[in-house]
């Protein structure tokens, strides 16, 4: 069954998960983007409206992640009609919460619905990557959990490189996003080109512990492994003010592990209880308050639904 | 209850498991070392007999892995008596089958029995590492699975760095040990001091797949992840004749993945069936036969018992 208009939702995601640099991401409950896509007889893609971005996102359909992803899908379908996209950004830009991945996913998921959902969420990966590549290269560590929900291992950019990992039920996440700009390009540029062999051994050991802890539902081991990143965090620490104090404050408030969400500046603290996560979020905000930085905080959980179609007609 | 004489068994092990360089090892069924340890009134450690080593192992108790490990344990216990060790090497030396780890473990496990087993297998790790360090530095990736059996993650050298991983029931392993010398020291010396960041990302992704595959019991994914090592294998390939042909022959015969056991020259091929493992072992031997190299082969499984006490009196 095909439709002429569909609205979709795509959640916030955090990539990297500390030691899982570029290979693991998770979807977050309660924050995301919405888009409504409507077929038009005239060819081409136009944005009827973009809201929630403070006017920052390009309106040119060749420069916007959502329309570039949609274009890849339309071309694949051999479509002659055009579409109109209404994009409602619920996610802040350049914050480490997977805003570009959500733009890419939400447009493609709505578009897939217009054709009666011929493709599974996993099969939509290549189209979404075309959009994501505009701002951060071909990386699936946000796009995959955004599409599928949960925690995903992404060992490559092909559809079969995605492997869902178990998300423990009692995992709660405190987030703080201080108001500082950390452009993804700069965060990538400061990464080392090489790492010592002993760092590789350390890092592979911690990734193994992380995956094992997820399977065993051992949140204590998960928190410990995740927070021991010796590659991305040391390289990026100077881009994120207050990182050391924030980690200490989060631990003191009961967090099991702290890591930089994506390229930052969002920090994520893993907790085993919702009340603790609320307390940790407030403790994180207090750190930034003392540094005269405003910040957004929330306590949330893993979103196990991923991208969803909200309505179609 | 304490004893005056105890005999123990410690299995063969393979470390590294391809992408799991220095962090994962497994114990093998049907091959191992035995040792009988007897209290003597006179202080000091003496070897009453060492067999099966072709006269290659040092008889000097300060130079032998078994006696150095035993010494660490005796010192820890504040023991004034001495011991006599009879060591029966069932494992070939410098072959990648954890011969030194087995020597270290078998002596300490027998000795622990003399005191009525005050320590768990895991708690014996530090004593065994003292012996293992004599020949290959402080690495627990053979010692841990040798002590505990199964497949173990070893993210460090402390007792709590050991985490048993699930070993799938239907995992079979074909082994070939060609008659070429690969000294551990040389195999370590050829390792690169640094690796590119993209190799780190690749390798952590594959380690994550490996651990996930073990938990899911997915042998196909396990074989694929394990065989993709981009760090140790490229550096060591020239030390192991016929590696490329052996891999191809094993795959053709039905193996799911091939990796270098420890520092080599033993090659391990993972299979999902015992009959296939026998066929793969013969195919591996044929490769070395064509290269005019004699080889030992066997088809075996993961040893889930680890080190055991055979008798005590």
Image: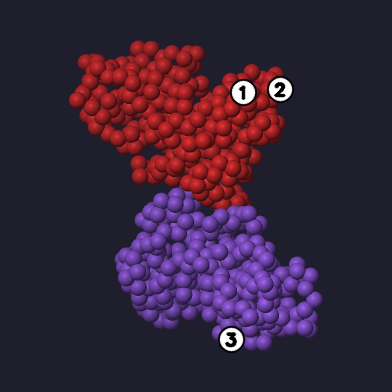
Chain colours: A red, B purple
- On whether disc 3 and disc 2 are found on a single subunit, the reply is no
Identify the disc placed on residue A178: 1
Quick one: SS at disc 2?
A: loop
Q: Give the quarter of the image for residue A291.
A: top right
Q: Quadrant of the C terminus of chain A?
A: top left
Considering only vertical position in the picture, is A185 above or below B135? above
Considering only vertical position in the picture, is A11 above or below A122? above
**In the depicted view, which residue is nearer to us: A302 or A226?**
A302
Residue for badge 3: B51
**In the depicted view, which residue is nearer to us: A162 or A285?**
A285
Which residue lies at the image location 55% right of the left edge and 26% below the top edge? Answer: A299
The subunit carrying tag 1 is A
- On whether disc 2 and disc 1 are found on a single subunit, the reply is yes
Gap between marks 1 and 3 measured at Cα = 67 Å
Which residue lies at the image location 61% right of the left edge and 54% below the top edge? Answer: B161
Q: Quadrant of the N terminus of chain A?
A: top left
Mark 3 Cα shell of 10 Å, populated few (<14), some (14-19), many (≥20): some
Which residue lies at the image location 45% right of the left edge and 42% below the top edge? Answer: A166
| Residue most extreme to the left | A1
Q: In the drawing, does residue A126 fall left or right of residue B227?
A: left
Which residue lies at the image location 64% right of the left edge and 57% below the top edge? Answer: B159
Q: Give the quarter of the image for residue A181.
A: top right
């Amino acid at each position: 069954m095909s439709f002429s208009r569909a609205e979709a939702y795509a959640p916030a995601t955090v990539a990297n998960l500390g030691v899982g640099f570029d290979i693991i991401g998770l979807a977050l409950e309660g924050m995301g983007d919405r888009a409504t896509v409507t077929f038009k007889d005239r060819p081409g893609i136009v944005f009827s409206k973009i809201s929630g971005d403070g006017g920052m996102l390009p309106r040119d359909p060749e420069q916007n992640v959502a329309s570039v992803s949609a274009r890849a899908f339309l071309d694949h379908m051999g479509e002659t009609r055009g579409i109109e996209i209404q994009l409602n950004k619920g996610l802040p830009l350049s914050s480490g919460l997977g805003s570009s991945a959500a733009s890419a996913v939400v447009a493609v998921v709505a578009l897939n619905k217009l054709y009666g959902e011929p493709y599974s969420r996993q099969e939509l990966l290549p189209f979404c990557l075309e959009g994501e590549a505009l701002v951060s290269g071909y990386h699936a560590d946000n796009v995959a959990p955004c599409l599928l929900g949960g925690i995903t291992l992404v060992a490559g950019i092909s559809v079969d490189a995605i492997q869902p990992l178990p998300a423990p039920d009692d995992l709660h996440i405190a987030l703080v996003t201080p108001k500082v700009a950390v452009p993804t390009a700069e965060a990538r540029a400061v990464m080392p080109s090489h790492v010592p062999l002993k760092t590789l051994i350390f890092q592979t050991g911690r990734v193994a512990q992380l995956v094992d802890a997820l399977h065993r539902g051992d949140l204590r081991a998960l928190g410990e492994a995740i927070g021991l990143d010796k590659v991305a965090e040391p390289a990026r620490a100077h881009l994120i003010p207050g990182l050391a104090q924030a980690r200490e404050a989060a631990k003191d408030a009961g967090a099991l592990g702290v890591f930089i969400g994506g390229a930052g500046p969002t920090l994520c603290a893993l907790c085993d209880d919702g009340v603790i996560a609320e307390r940790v979020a407030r403790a994180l905000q207090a750190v930034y308050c003392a540094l005269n930085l405003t910040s957004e905080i929330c306590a949330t959980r893993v979103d196990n639904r991923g991208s969803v179609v909200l309505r179609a007609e």
